[in-house]
């Protein structure tokens, strides 16, 4: 039985709780996997801890209501511990970090992650900040503490982009990764192909919850850049830094640009690419016109894809639209299941 | 150090030997993985065994020459043991089965696989016959003997179709698999779109080594059917049998059919599909006209793809052209590396 402490309880954390509620029995039957959420600590909704585990249904209801005040008080329940106190004072063995992404300092998530690992707790995160800014330091700390660190949910949501490369392509040398890895810009470009203006397409993306009120993280390419750095460092073994990536967003693309590409049987896509060669590493995020024969050209809406270039098996492309609470919650679950399968083998 | 006995030494076995020759040092450095080919037993080229391992360079040269007679005789070398004697009498701990596929009886491969597992040896195979006809029996035998059974190379060559589903999508329930999983027919259909007749396209496929002298296994859909049964049984947990799959090949498609689809912005693809629902399982292999927006429509030449339908993360599509000696050799290597990582964890 894994005892989870969730730091942050937005869409992603709620997605994991929903999956555990819905599929908990099946996961136990199929994999012998059992997990209990013993603590949830957030910056805005409050915090809960119960040594024998929180009630998932009540937790989800309180999470959706926006405050844990409505979570029923039962003997043994402790409220109000902040994230760090929750990490330090509870007996959770896995910390699930899903607070907001910060590409400047990675805080407060980086402190959450490192504090938990220092205590020998396993850490699973869908937070891009710490992984983009400090993956190798975090991985070294986890190794030193013999703790598990999982970050599958940071790229392509629930579509297993990192695990495919790390586990299924183990044995290959990956010399390049090239993808459409920001769903918001892909949605906007698809809408513009159907005749919408950039402003209208952005407004619709915001209305549907794909784009944030300040959309610059998506449309200026920062989100794709952060994910590209994660890909480079976690699956290609590079030490790529933010300022080594050339970046151009999609805000300069006009309806004429879109139409001109369509007239040539091509499509604009915001491409994130990293390639290594003996001459060095080249990495960029920029809009490119792709012929329809490119597997990355035929992605509509918020669908993402990554093509890995490998030495032994050529190009391998993974396509999926893994965004949303449940898919990203699945990414967290898949990290938990990897930890579980390692623990099972260790016990043999 | 894994001691491998290769049963069969065609393209696939030679591909594995090439990879071990080329990347052996890197694999040891990166994963702590070491393997030595101690025996090779074939039906036509002869057989070799040396307790301290065969010389890979000389083995590959003899393999390409078509006979092991040219392999240098050194003290301790034993020649001429047949496959079963090789499995029984040598101290190999992993048997790599790559003889020819037989969808009627799965023999002689099935006997090779079961004999090795009965002896407690691990088995890795790229041979579709035993997996399509007897996967559950083989898996049960392997579990009983605490032996590893890997069959990644049976579907999509080196592109990790089974491992993606089995490991990276663990936690999801996969309710459907739909793919273009026969490269030869996809090549023929692509050529026909460019104006070739069926006969000319088939002849070119034969000239390039994609299609066999008797092409019926590919063009009548039997190869795709066998792979579909493997997918259903290994990653979806079904017990699908050959005669439960509706099958139609591509031989009836005329140039007019191809042109009519193109005129409608559609493409013919030989689709293999299996779906489960509470009402039962539906499985078929048949040509379908796909709109270009279908991720399976935009595959050219011998490129393959599979879309898995999952409960937690929607549709996940894997695209690759993993055919050929080195890619399929990689599939065997990836099974070996999975066995190795399990062994490492067991020793912790």
Image (cartoon, coloured by chain):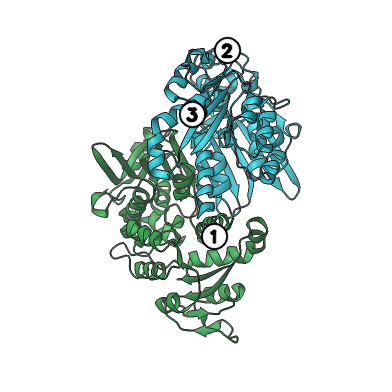
Chain colours: A green, B cyan
Q: Is label 3 on the same chain as label 1? A: no
Percent position (x, y) of residue B61?
A: 44, 17
Q: Which residue is mark 1?
A: A326
Q: Nearer the viewer, mark 2 or mark 3?
A: 3
| Residue occupying the point 63% across, 52% down | B173
Q: Quick check: A230 left or right of B341? A: left
Which picture quadrant has residue A267? top left
Q: Which residue is mark 3?
A: B53
Where disc 2 sits, the SS reads helix
Q: Nearer the viewer, mark 3 or mark 1?
A: 3
Q: Is residue B260 above or below residue B72?
A: below
Which picture quadrant has residue B20? top left
Q: Is residue A89 above or below residue A250?
A: below
Q: Is label 1 on the same chain as label 2? A: no
Callout 2: chain: B
Q: Is residue B73 above or below residue A304?
A: above
| Residue occupying the point 30% across, 54% down | A220
Q: Which residue is mark 2?
A: B199
Q: Is residue B322 visible?
A: no
Callout 1: chain: A
Q: Is residue B345 visible?
A: yes
| Residue occupying the point 52% across, 29% down | B51
Quadrant into which the N terminus of chain A falls? bottom right
The Cα–Cα distance between marks 3 and 1, rounded to whole angstroms, is 50 Å
Q: Residues within 10 Å of mark 1 (few under 14, many from 20)?
A: many
Q: Residues within 10 Å of mark 2 (few under 14, many from 20)?
A: few
> Of A119 and A166, which appears nearest the observer?
A119
Where disc 1 sits, the SS reads helix
Which picture quadrant has residue B79? top right
The Cα–Cα distance between marks 2 and 3, rounded to whole angstroms, is 47 Å
Percent position (x, y) of residue B30?
A: 39, 44
| Residue occupying the point 59% across, 31% down | B289
């Amino acid at each position: 039985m894994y005892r989870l402490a969730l730091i942050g309880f937005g869409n992603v954390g709620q997605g994991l709780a929903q999956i555990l509620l819905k599929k908990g029995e099946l996961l136990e039957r199929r994999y012998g996997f059992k997990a209990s959420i013993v603590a949830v600590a957030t910056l805005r909704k409050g915090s809960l801890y119960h040594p024998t585990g929180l009630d998932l249904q009540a937790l989800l209801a309180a999470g959706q209501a926006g405050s844990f005040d409505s979570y029923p008080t039962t003997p043994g329940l402790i409220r109000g511990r902040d994230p760090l106190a929750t990490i330090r004072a509870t007996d959770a063995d896995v910390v699930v970090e899903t607070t907001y992404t910060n590409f400047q300092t990675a805080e407060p998530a980086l402190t959450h992650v490192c504090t938990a690992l220092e205590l020998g707790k396993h850490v699973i995160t869908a937070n891009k900040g710490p992984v983009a800014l400090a993956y190798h330091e975090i991985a070294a700390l986890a190794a030193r503490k013999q703790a598990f660190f999982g970050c599958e949910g940071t790229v392509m949501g629930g579509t297993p982009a990192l695990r495919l490369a790390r586990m299924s392509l183990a044995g290959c040398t990956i010399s390049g990764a090239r993808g459409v890895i920001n769903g918001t810009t892909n949605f906007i470009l698809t809408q513009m192909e159907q005749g919408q203006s950039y402003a209208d397409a952005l407004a619709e993306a915001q209305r549907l919850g794909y784009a944030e009120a300040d959309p610059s993280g998506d449309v200026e390419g920062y989100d794709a850049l952060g994910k590209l750095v994660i890909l480079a460092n976690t699956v290609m073994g590079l030490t790529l830094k933010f300022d080594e990536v050339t970046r151009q967003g999609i805000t300069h693309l006009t309806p004429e640009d879109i139409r001109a590409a369509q007239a040539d049987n091509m499509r604009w896509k915001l491409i994130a690419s990293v390639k290594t060669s003996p001459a060095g590493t080249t990495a960029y995020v920029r809009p490119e016109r792709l012929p329809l024969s490119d597997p990355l050209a035929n992605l509509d809406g918020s669908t993402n894809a990554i093509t890995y270039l490998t030495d032994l098996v050529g190009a391998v492309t993974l396509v999926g639209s893994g965004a949303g609470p449940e898919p990203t919650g699945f990414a967290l679950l898949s990290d938990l299941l990897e930890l579980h399968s390692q623990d099972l083998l260790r016990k043999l």
